[in-house]
Image (cartoon, helix red, strand yellow):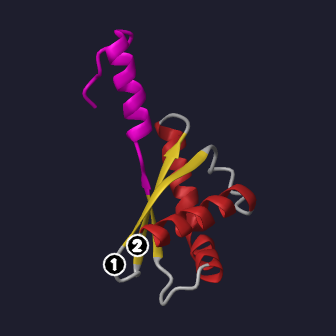
Amino acid sequence: MRRVNEAVREVVSAHLGQDVADPRIGFVTVTGVETSADLRSARVFVSVLGDEHDREAALAGLRSAGGYLQQQVGVEIRMKRTPSLEFVLDDSIREGMRITELLAGEARPRREE
């Protein structure tokens, strides 16, 4: 499964950078993929540079391009099934930066949202 996840991540990343021209998708990085054991679905974790509005817009753009990206996965990777793609925000990078700031004593107290 690790090889399948990596192959799906590579195909999605490559086509996001080359083929998808949706202006809502700004600086998006595919950080990981988790494919179900039956190959029916894959959760694609993405990190988006920007504020909350940018992240939501990028997710909407990714969902819009999901069919095309799924088709490219099916063309480039020979599998019994082509998984449907679900895009999920990966906040681990942002949280890691926040923790680093807290440890350095530079962060403002976090507001409850």
Dot 2 amino acid type? Met
Q: Nearer the viewer, residue 90 or 11?
A: 11
Q: Is residue 103 magenta?
A: yes
Secondary structure beneath label 2: loop
Q: Earlier in the sequence, mark 1 or mark 2?
A: 2
Residue 14: % across, % down: 67, 61
Q: Which residue is mark 2?
A: 1
Q: Residue furthest left?
A: 112
| Residue 21 marker | none
User: What segment carries the magenta color?
Assistant: 88-113
Q: Nearer the viewer, residue 70 or 50?
A: 70
Q: Is residue 72 magenta?
A: no
The C terminus: image quadrant: top left
Residue 18: % across, % down: 74, 59
Q: Nearer the viewer, residue 7 or 26?
A: 7
The N terminus: image quadrant: bottom left
- Identified at 44% across, 37% down, the residue is 93
Q: Which residue is mark 1?
A: 37
- Identified at 46% across, 78% down, the residue is 83
Residue 24: % across, % down: 63, 50
Other-residue count near label 1 (Cα within 10 Å), few / some / many at <14 / 14–19 / ≥20: few
Dot 1 amino acid type? Ala
